[in-house]
Image (cartoon, rainbow, N blue to C red):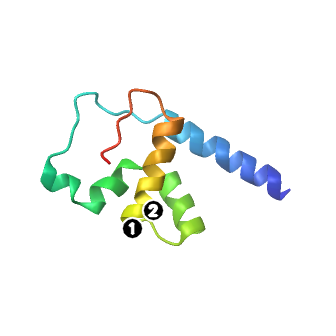
């Protein structure tokens, strides 16, 4: 049962990441890049909730970097994370 729940959660996260729409010409300014809130807002809400449950937080730059790596790895090649 636990394995089925985890597999389903993974499929839902993957679907959310693949449904993200990111403009190709988007690149944040330096002032915005230094904002952790921008990094967190780039992640789908489902991934934010998952990472908070697993890692205990989402507002840390290291945790957000891991989330963006997940998005870059799973998402389409047109998604460009701010980090």
* Label disc, if present, on residue 63 of the rendered structure: 2
Q: Are marks 2 and 1 in contact (CB under 8 Å)?
A: yes
Q: What is the secondary structure assignment of the residue under circle 1?
A: loop
- Looking at the image, can residue 2 be seen? yes
* Residue position for label 1: 60
Q: Position of residue 61 (x, y in %)?
A: 36, 63
Report which quarter residue 2 is drawn in. Answer: bottom right
Q: Which residue is drawn at the image coordinates 35% and 36% (left, top)? A: 80
**Dot 1 alpha-carbon crowd within 10 angstroms: few under 14, some 14 to 19, many 20 or more:** few
Q: Residues within 10 Å of mark 2 (few under 14, many from 20)?
A: some
Q: Secondary structure at mark 2?
A: helix
Q: CA distance from mark 2 to mark 1?
A: 5 Å
Q: Nearer the viewer, residue 45 or 65?
A: 65
Q: Position of residue 11 (x, y in %)?
A: 66, 41
Give me the residue at 44% from left, 65% from top: 58
Residue 41 point in image, percent of width and height: 34, 53
């Amino acid at each position: 049962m636990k394995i089925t729940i985890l597999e389903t959660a993974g499929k839902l996260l993957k679907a959310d990441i693949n449904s993200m729409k990111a403009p190709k010409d988007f690149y944040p300014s330096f002032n915005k890049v230094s904002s952790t809130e921008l990094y967190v807002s780039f992640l789908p809400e489902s991934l934010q909730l998952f990472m908070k449950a697993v890692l205990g937080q989402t507002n840390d730059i290291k945790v957000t970097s891991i989330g963006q790596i997940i998005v870059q790895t799973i998402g389409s090649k047109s998604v460009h994370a701010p980090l």
